[in-house]
Image (cartoon, grey):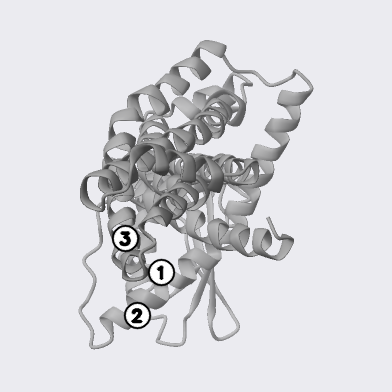
């Protein structure tokens, strides 16, 4: 055992010892006071002379009487050296407050310049896949918290302000009408041209109405609305919650005994689940108008005939499927945006990354749920 005691027998001074356990583990024991008024050891000298067989580092701070930022700086420098040498650090022996502050320091630290390698692209792809796999338990945990919050809502115990809910409804609903109108009209236009190019070969231009009506009401209207909301609102949710995470407002809610899931996430979930189905119906109506415009002006289909064929083609089940998909897509977008916002770090860069990740995650979840629901409805004959 190598030990250092700067003032022998004085409990008010720092004490340090390093002990090898086996061939690959080094246990560092810190005792006494590790404060700014002490002449603390240099972190770079701790691992000097330990050899290349050292792969793990652990701590024992049971006798630590006091610490401040000087101890954090010492540990931070030691962790950087361990990372450069490929040594894994076990922080379970450190005080919880130290671990929390070190985690916050790691979140706000700048980006690390990565060493270029021959397999850089493959390595980054692998690391991204591993990161998503490691994030799956956190996603399930967040989903469980939201489910519990909905349970509290049904029993009248959820704590949030109704005016926040109405504000979110206005933000995700009426203010998104313009962009939804433009995209839906253009998609309906494209769908009508695409169908007409094939149908006119057999003289069946009238069935453009069936194609556009069923496609927009049942599938494309909900899908395009979900993607629009993911890019517009999902990123907004992540940025808002991420900024609150940076400003420690979410920590303040927890300190006051208010659940951030109830107060911040639940209104956003409800707003999207209520408004996206309505936007889906609106998108379907705009798409059908675009199909009618193309059919009447380009392919010589009468307006009354187009209207009659549309009414004949549409059934109640098509509207119900579209509404259900819109509600599910809205829930997926809100879930992705709130998840990434609550997982945001403590820096401005982390807020940007959270917004980007929210859009990607939202569109990915929409695609997965759309595939699953389409297969289920097909098997059920709906």
**Between 184 and 225, the one nearer to me in the picture:** 184
Which sits earlier in the primary sequence, circle 1 or circle 2? 2
Disc 3 marks which residue? Answer: 196
How far apart are the alpha carbons under marks 3 and 1? 43 Å
Q: Which residue, given by chain and number where applicable, does mark 1 sit on?
A: 128
Q: Secondary structure at mark 1?
A: helix
Q: Residue sitting at 34 percent across and 80 percent down?
A: 123
Image quadrant in which you'd find residue 317: top right
Give how far across and how far down residue 380 sits, in percent. 73, 60
Q: Mark 3 and 1 residues: CB-CB less than 8 Å, in contact?
A: no
Please give left or right for residue 231 compared with residue 29 in the image: left
Q: Which mark is residue 123?
A: 2
Q: Secondary structure at mark 3?
A: helix
Callout 3: 10 Å neighbours few (<14), some, many (20+)? many
Whether residue 35 appears in this view of the structure is no
The mark lying in front, picked from 2 and 3, is 3
Whether residue 163 can be seen here: yes
Q: Is residue 166 left or right of residue 137?
A: left
């Amino acid at each position: 055992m190598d030990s250092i005691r700067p003032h022998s027998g004085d409990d008010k001074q720092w004490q340090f010892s390093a002990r090898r356990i086996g061939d690959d583990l080094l246990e560092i024991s810190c005792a006494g006071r590790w404060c700014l008024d002490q002449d603390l050891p240099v972190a770079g000298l701790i691992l000097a002379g330990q050899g290349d067989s050292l792969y793990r580092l652990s701590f024992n701070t049971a006798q630590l009487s006091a610490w401040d930022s000087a101890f954090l700086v010492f540990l931070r420098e030691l962790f950087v050296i361990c990372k450069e040498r490929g040594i894994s650090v076990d922080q379970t022996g450190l005080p919880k407050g130290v671990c929390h502050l070190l985690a916050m320091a790691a979140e706000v630290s700048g980006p690390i310049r990565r060493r270029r390698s021959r397999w850089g692209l493959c390595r980054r792809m692998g690391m991204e896949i591993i990161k998503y796999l490691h994030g799956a338990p956190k996603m399930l945990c967040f989903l469980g918290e939201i489910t519990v919050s909905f349970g509290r809502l049904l029993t009248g115990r959820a704590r949030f302000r109704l005016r926040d809910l109405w504000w979110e409804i206005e933000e995700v609903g009426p203010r998104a009408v313009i962009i939804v109108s433009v995209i839906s009209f253009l998609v309906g236009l494209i769908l009508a041209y695409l169908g007409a190019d094939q149908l006119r070969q057999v003289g069946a231009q009238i069935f453009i109405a069936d194609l556009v009506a069923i496609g927009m009401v049942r599938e494309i209207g909900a899908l395009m609305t979900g993607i629009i909301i993911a890019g517009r609102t999902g990123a907004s949710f992540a940025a808002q919650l991420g900024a609150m995470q940076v400003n420690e407002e979410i920590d303040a809610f927890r300190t006051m005994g208010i659940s951030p899931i109830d107060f911040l996430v639940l209104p956003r979930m409800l707003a999207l689940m209520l408004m996206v189905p309505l936007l889906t119906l609106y998108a379907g109506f705009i798409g059908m108008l675009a199909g009618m415009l193309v059919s009447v002006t380009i392919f010589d289909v009468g307006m009354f005939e187009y209207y009659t064929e549309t009414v004949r083609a549409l059934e109640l089940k098509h509207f119900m499927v579209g509404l259900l998909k819109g509600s599910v897509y809205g829930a997926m977008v809100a879930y992705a945006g709130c998840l990434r916002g609550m997982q945001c770090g403590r820096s401005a860069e982390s807020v940007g990354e959270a917004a980007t990740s929210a859009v990607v995650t939202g569109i990915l979840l929409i695609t997965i749920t759309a595939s699953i629901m389409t297969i289920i409805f097909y098997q059920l004959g709906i």
